[in-house]
Image (cartoon, rainbow, N blue to C red):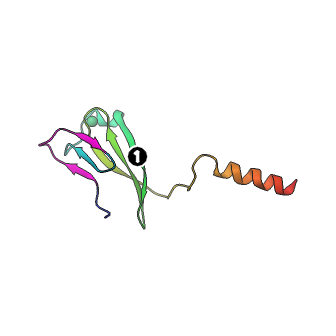
Amino acid sequence: MNATIVEYTDEKPPENLYPERIVSPTKGRACCARNMEQIGGVTREETRAYFYRRCRACGYTVRHFVSAPPPDSPGGLWEDEQTALLKLVA
Ligand SMILES: [Zn+2]
């Protein structure tokens, strides 16, 4: 199940039912550039990782692919390791 959860349609109003489903207009508009926000976390597939970005104004949603997988524990992993090393040295 690697298919996108985004349903692109202009027949229904935009809806954010993440992580089950997101209903998005088929096209972005001028508002999107300044209103895109990340929805949920990063999804990793075998060779790529992505997260969803959705426009607050119109609901337009895209998958944003990230070039490199993020660290497993963003925000503190390096610090924790360094602290542990310092303790070992001391
Ligand atoms: Zn928009």
* Residue 38 percent location from the top left of the image: 40, 42
- Picture quadrant of residue 23: top left
- Crowding around mark 1 (Cα neighbors within 10 Å: few <14, some 14 to 19, many 20+) is few
For image coordinates 57% across by 49% down, the residue present is 74
* Residue 12 percent location from the top left of the image: 14, 41
Q: Residue furthest bottom?
A: 46
Quadrant in which the N terminus appears: bottom left
In what quadrant does ligand 1 lie? top left
Left or right: where does residue 66 sit relative to residue 14? right
For image coordinates 35% across by 44% down, the residue present is 53
Q: How many numbered marks does the figure carry?
A: 1
Q: Residue furthest left?
A: 11
Q: Looking at mark 1, is its residue's CB closer than 8 Å to ligand 1?
A: no
Could you say which is closer to the camera, residue 70 or residue 84? 84
Give SS at disc 1.
strand
Residue 79 part of the magenta segment: no
**Where is 13 relative to 9, above or below?**
above
* Residue 24 percent location from the top left of the image: 23, 44
> What amino acid type is highlighted by mark number 1?
Gly
Left or right: where does residue 43 sit relative to residue 9? right
Q: Residue furthest right?
A: 90
* Residue 68 percent location from the top left of the image: 49, 58
Q: Which residue is mark 1?
A: 40
For image coordinates 32% across by 63% down, the residue present is 2
Q: Which residues are magenta?
A: 5-17
